[in-house]
């Protein structure tokens, strides 16, 4: 029996003969190296510096151990939003290429849009290579889970009810709603279903490698956590977000994770859909704060309320780390931990959103309980994303920079090392497919398949690689960015282009656009050229009436004030 390995994400690969299926995925015959299992762990709305191994004060000993035994990437990027990142993670294409995020001039595109038929999901490719594929947690991809190549799935569709979901499924079949007042908690349940799938794999399919996609729904709003976890952090955040940001920044620099200034707060930038100041006070609390203002400007009551919210955010991440530890222990008990690749990342930066939906917020309910609907808000999301600027939905570094931990004892010799290679979630599928012994397909149903823009991260497992990509590109809610080398061009919706030298100024505090107009024009032309390429690809199989359209990009309520020194 071939012994299998595991990757976290986690990736596991076993030896096999030549395989080739309808997608054209190919593995060469002959001596195939031991292939790891794959475990891909995704947090939802977790900031760059929330985890302990990325400078945070939140207790994450299991993630910290994975980082100490593997790699931490310092310049890894997501798409700034939930569903576009998941599209990239599972297809290897930019979300705009496959209609899973909007583009100017494209009528169809976004969270409700359908992928082109040729944009298949990674599990479909892995199954051709002999993998069993499992999913537990958030989906946020078009289509049913099992139709995307997974063998088993537990899917939480009710993201606003962490204690009593009404909509969740097992293998795409509805499960009964969970009644209020029970012991259910989404993070624990997602991990438990994953553990059950791993146990089934051990008992019934141990000769095959597996891919586990473990997609937690936290710390996304609403802030829901177990009381005993909240209690651990209740006093910690009374010092305020200014102090926490500074403390994280100093640890990040000491760890070598960043070499830049601490960005200032952006009090004039909030999501356009946030509650008004009047609604914040009436629907949530008189002590809610809708903007990232200095902590000392808050009243004592506001400070107490805000500190409690961050304690809940920390408790959610703390519990996720505990559940990750349970999964790791299961891998060890199965005897596959050493041969497992584990990837851990977040789908976007921490969120400045303050909204009120679902069952609505009950001001009488205990903060963090099922009856409450609290959001982290821009003050604390600025701390969670430290040292960077802005938040989820924006494509400045605070919205798109994610921690990435890669752990694979048998396949990665490095222990506790950093990788500074700029890379992106589009790189994950190609990396896993290479580890699985396959090659990216070149055709689909007899037609040429568009090449993936992703690059394999495998060379970075051994050493830093100066450049994998010629460019990295972003667009979301009208916010635009492109990175070429160390130069990054970015703008908020309908705002002017800003130019940053990320080698000297990763925190985007000094706008160099007026100093280098020629470089602005060069990067803008590259952004526009790629946008047009993506538009053509996204619409090539659509009728003209569905393809044509003019989008009005969403924009924040106000443009950001320029940071000091801009």
Image (cartoon, helix red, strand yellow):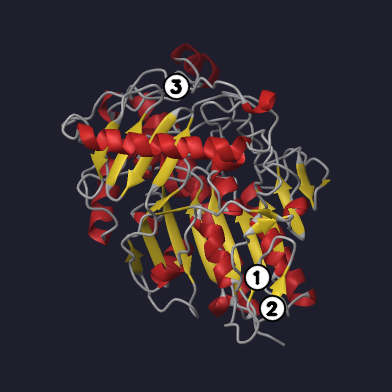
The image shows residue 318, relative to residue 16, as above or below, that is above
Q: Is residue 10 visible?
A: no
For the point 33% across and 26% down, the residue is: 300
Viewport quadrant of the N terminus: bottom right
Residue highlighted by disc 2: 18
| Discs 3, 1 touching: Cβ within 8 Å | no
Separation of disc 1 and disc 2 at Cα? 7 Å
Separation of disc 2 and disc 3 at Cα? 50 Å
Q: Element type at marker 2?
A: loop
Q: As drawn, which residue projects farthest toward the top?
A: 278
Q: Position of residue 289 (x, y in %)?
A: 40, 23
- All told, the count of numbered labels is 3
Q: Nearer the viewer, mark 2 or mark 3?
A: 2
Residue highlighted by disc 3: 555
Instruction: Pick whichever of labels 2 and 3 is earlier in the sequence.
Output: 2
For the point 38% across and 43% down, the residue is: 384
Which of 554 and 334 lies nearest the eye of the viewer?
554
Instruction: Pick whichever of labels 1 and 2 is earlier in the sequence.
Output: 2
| Discs 1, 2 touching: Cβ within 8 Å | yes
Q: Position of residue 85 (x, y in %)?
A: 54, 45
Crowd around label 2: few <14 · some 14–19 · many ≥20 (10 Å): some
Separation of disc 3 and disc 1 at Cα? 44 Å
Q: Position of residue 360 (x, y in %)?
A: 63, 24
Q: Element type at marker 3?
A: loop
Viewport quadrant of the C terminus: top left
Residue highlighted by disc 1: 26
Q: Position of residue 435 (x, y in %)?
A: 56, 71
Q: Which mark is residue 184?
A: none
Crowd around label 1: few <14 · some 14–19 · many ≥20 (10 Å): many
For the point 62% across and 75% down, the residue is: 13
Which of 32 and 462 lies nearest the eye of the viewer?
32
Crowd around label 3: few <14 · some 14–19 · many ≥20 (10 Å): many
């Amino acid at each position: 029996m071939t012994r299998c390995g595991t990757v976290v994400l986690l990736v596991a690969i076993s030896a096999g003969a030549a395989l080739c299926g309808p997608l054209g995925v190919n593995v060469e015959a002959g001596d195939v190296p031991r292939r790891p299992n794959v475990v891909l762990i995704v947090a939802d709305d977790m900031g760059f510096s929330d985890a302990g191994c990325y400078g945070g004060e939140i207790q994450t000993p299991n993630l910290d151990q994975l980082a100490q035994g593997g790699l931490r990437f310092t310049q890894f990027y997501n798409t700034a939003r939930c569903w576009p990142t998941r599209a990239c993670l599972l297809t290897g294409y930019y979300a705009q290429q496959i209609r899973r995020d909007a583009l100017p001039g494209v009528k169809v595109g976004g969270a409700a849009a359908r992928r082109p038929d040729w944009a298949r999901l990674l599990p479909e490719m892995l199954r051709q290579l002999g993998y069993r594929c499992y999913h537990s947690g958030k989906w946020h991809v078009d289509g049913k889970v099992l139709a995307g190549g997974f063998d088993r799935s537990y899917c939480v569709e009710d993201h606003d009810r962490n204690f009593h979901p009404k909509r969740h499924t097992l293998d795409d079949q509805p499960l009964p709603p969970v009644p209020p007042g029970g012991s259910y908690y989404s993070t624990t349940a997602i991990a438990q279903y994953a553990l059950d799938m791993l146990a089934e794999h051990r008992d019934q399919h141990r000769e095959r490698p597996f891919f586990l996609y473990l997609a937690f729904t936290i710390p996304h709003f609403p802030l829901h956590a177990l009381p005993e976890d909240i209690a651990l952090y209740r006093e910690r955040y009374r010092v305020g977000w200014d102090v926490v940001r500074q403390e994280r920044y100093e640890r990040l620099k000491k760890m070598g994770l960043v070499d830049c200034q601490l960005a200032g707060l952006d009090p004039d930038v909030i999501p356009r859909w946030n509650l008004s100041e009047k609604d914040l006070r009436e629907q949530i609390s008189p002590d809610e704060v809708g903007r990232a203002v200095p902590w000392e400007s808050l009243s004592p009551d506001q400070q107490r309320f805000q500190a409690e919210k961050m304690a809940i955010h920390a408790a959610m991440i703390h519990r996720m780390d505990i559940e990750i530890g349970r999964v790791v222990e299961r891998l060890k008990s199965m005897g596959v931990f050493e041969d497992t690749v584990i990837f851990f990342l977040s789908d976007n930066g921490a969120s400045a959103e303050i909204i009120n939906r679902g069952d609505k917020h009950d001001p009488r309910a205990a903060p963090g309980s099922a009856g409450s609907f609290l959001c982290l808000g821009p003050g604390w999301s600025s701390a969670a994303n430290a040292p960077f600027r802005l938040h989820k939905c924006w494509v400045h570094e605070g919205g798109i920079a994610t921690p990435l931990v890669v752990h694979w004892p048998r396949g990665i010799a490095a222990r506790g090392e950093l990788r500074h290679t700029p890379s992106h979630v589009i790189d994950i599928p190609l990396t896993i497919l290479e580890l699985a012994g396959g090659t990216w397909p070149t055709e689909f149903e007899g037609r040429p398949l568009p090449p993936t823009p992703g690059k394999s991260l495998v060379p970075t497992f051994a050493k830093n690689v100066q450049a994998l990509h010629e460019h990295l590109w972003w667009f979301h809610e009208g916010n635009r960015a492109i990175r070429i080398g160390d130069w990054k061009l970015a703008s908020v919706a309908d705002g002017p282009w800003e130019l940053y030298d990320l080698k000297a100024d990763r925190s985007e505090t000094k706008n160099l656009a007026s100093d280098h107009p020629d470089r602005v024009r060069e990067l803008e032309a590259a952004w526009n050229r790629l946008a047009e390429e993506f538009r053509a690809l996204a619409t090539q199989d659509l009728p003209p009436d569905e393809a044509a359209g003019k989008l009005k990009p969403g924009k924040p309520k106000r443009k950001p004030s320029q940071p000091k020194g801009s």
